[in-house]
Image (tube, rainbow, N blue to C red):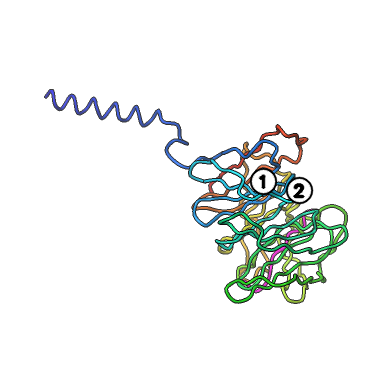
Amino acid sequence: MRSAILKTALSALAVVLVGSVPAQATGKPSTFDLPDGFQPEGIAIGPGPYAYFGSRATGDIYRASLRTGKGSVVSKGPGTPSLGLETDGRRLFVAGGTGGDARVIDLRTGKVIKSYKLATGESFVNDVILTRGAAYFTDSTNPVLYKLKLGRGGALPAKAVTIPLKGDIEYGSGINANGIAPSPDRRSLLVVQSNTGKLFEADPSSGATTEVDLGGEALTNGDGLLLSGRTLYAVLNRDNTVAAVGLARDGSSGKIVKRLTDPRFDVPTTVAAYGHRLYLPNARFTTTPTPETPYTVVAVKR
């Protein structure tokens, strides 16, 4: 009897102890800090549970563990922005914003393998996507895509190719082409235009664009895009929302099937996935940046 009573008491104590442990102590943190003053914009995840973030202020690249939320700067920037990011597992492709450039960084050493000057005049190289044979960059100021054609084993080209955008997309004032992702059938690219909220299919060879039929809805303030199967996650930055768009296989039409919001959102810009979570850096565009301004990364369930 005494043994049974003791066993029951110990079981009850175990329940109390487990119940008193904060949720973050038993798993990956759902919110973690970036360095004060960092001004994040882009995110890329992998290989493994590591996320990379680019600084709008300095171009520094920060790596954080998704298991602990801890990290450090692994590549010093050139003093111009690092915006959209994409990784192939060994290299990080970086969109250079107002610097008008693109950089490719070795993830092991943090060193710049190669830098490309994409534009000589006013430009805003905003985001990047990797396909099987190329990297494509958007420019929010100029109606073009920039292409790095990759050779055998992912060999980098000597220079970039500029592909003029034509067809349905029309550039206006403000932020134009922003986030970019592949279509579900991988035959075209999807590009969101922030100022109009329109989504376009773009032919990666010709630059011809066709507006995606969203059933009358818009992705205004559309920023980073992430394709998962036939679901396109579009970050609507100043709306503090992620719109989940169910797409046709060829990407020609879609419907917003869900809108994700969270009180921790503070103008998130881009999104990447790990496991059943989406990770988004808070760019805090509505907050005047200082060297002491705090920034966070938020994880939400898909």
> Would you call the spot at circle 2 few (<14 residues within 10 Å), some (14-19), or many (20 or more)?
few
Q: Secondary structure at mark 2?
A: loop
> Which structural element holds mark 1?
strand
The dot on residue 241 is 1
User: At which x and y percent is residue 270?
Assistant: 66, 51
Q: Which stretch did the figure color magenta?
A: 186-194
Q: Is residue 12 above or below residue 104?
A: above
Residue 233 percent location from the top left of the image: 63, 55
250 within the magenta span: no
Q: Disc 2 or 1, which lies upstream in sequence?
A: 2
- 192 in the magenta segment: yes
Give the CA separation, mark 2 to mark 1.
30 Å
Which mark's residue is nearer the viewer, 2 or 1?
2
Q: Is residue 180 left or right of residue 171?
A: left
Of 249 and 39, the residue lying toward us: 39
Q: Amino acid at mark 2?
A: Gly
Picture mark count: 2
Q: Quarter holding the N terminus?
A: top left
Check disc 2 and report the residue beneath it.
79
